[in-house]
Image (cartoon, rainbow, N blue to C red):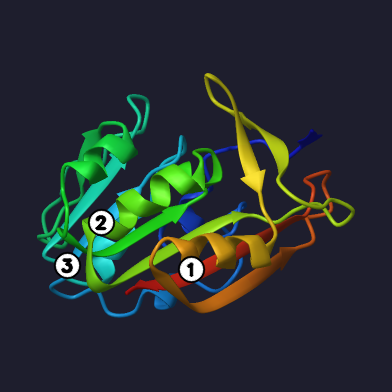
Amino acid sequence: MTDSPDTEEPPRSTRERFHWDWHRRTEPGAELLGDLSGQVVAELAANRPGQASVLARMWAPARIVVVGPRHVPRQRRRRAGEARTHPETVRFDPERYLRRHPGCFDVVYSVFGPLGRVDPDILLPRIAAALKPGGLLAFSTLAPAATGAGPLRRRTAVRGGGSQHRALAVDRWHQLLGAHGFDTAATDTIHDPGDGSGQPGVVTNVFRTVRR
């Protein structure tokens, strides 16, 4: 078990953009999701503030649903002049929510969300069933430590408690995705060396997969 960086709310300047990496300061961004205009989108949320409102401002998706545990922050109310599509927060177990909404979504994404904590053999079939054929799943996870192998877990400090993230190797994720009905379109590895102030570097893997 190794310690990973503390989870802190990012500065306001970084909240105006979409990020996949742990510290929310490194490219790439929302372009990995493609054009979401008219799409029905679900975010499988983590314990930290999500980024659905950024996507709502960038495009005009038909709907964005943020699904997460009871303590997931609610999206603030839409202000005058902002995008009409406003994220809906559903405080519900993601696995149960997806099971109740088969074939509903064009895109499901997650930034260090439940795919890093819940058994992928349980959650991936639920995501596949909730996506329409040809739908996109995109998610980011911690990469294994340089000296680690296999299903290494890294402890993550969060407000109000702690959680653990699976840090599986890229090949293992590809195997799991293929076994549960997904074709991997691309995998990006983001290296953040840290900021020199004691904040450790983090390696993030971002997966983009298409439901068969």
Label 1: few (<14), some (14–19) or many (≥20) C-alpha neighbours in 10 Å: some
Q: Is residue 25 visible?
A: no
Tell us which disc is closer to us: 1 or 3.
1
Give the alpha-carbon distance from disc 2 to disc 1, as whole Å. 14 Å
Percent of width and height locating residue 4: 73, 40
Q: Which quadrant holds residue 70?
A: top left
Q: Which quadrant holds residue 195?
A: bottom right
Q: Amino acid at mark 2?
A: Ala
Residue to which mark 2 is pinned = 129
Label 2: few (<14), some (14–19) or many (≥20) C-alpha neighbours in 10 Å: many
Residue to which mark 3 is pinned = 61
Percent of width and height locating residue 1: 79, 33
Left or right side of 124 for 28: right
Residue to which mark 1 is pinned = 178
Q: Earlier in the sequence, mark 3 or mark 2?
A: 3
Give the alpha-carbon distance from disc 3 to disc 2, as whole Å. 21 Å
Tell us which disc is closer to us: 3 or 2.
2
Q: Amino acid at mark 1?
A: Gly
Quick check: marks 3 and 2 in contact, CB under 8 Å?
no
Q: Is residue 38 visible?
A: yes
Residue at the far top: name it.
160
Q: Residue at 57%, 72% (x, y): give it.
A: 27
Give the alpha-carbon distance from disc 1 to disc 3, as whole Å. 28 Å
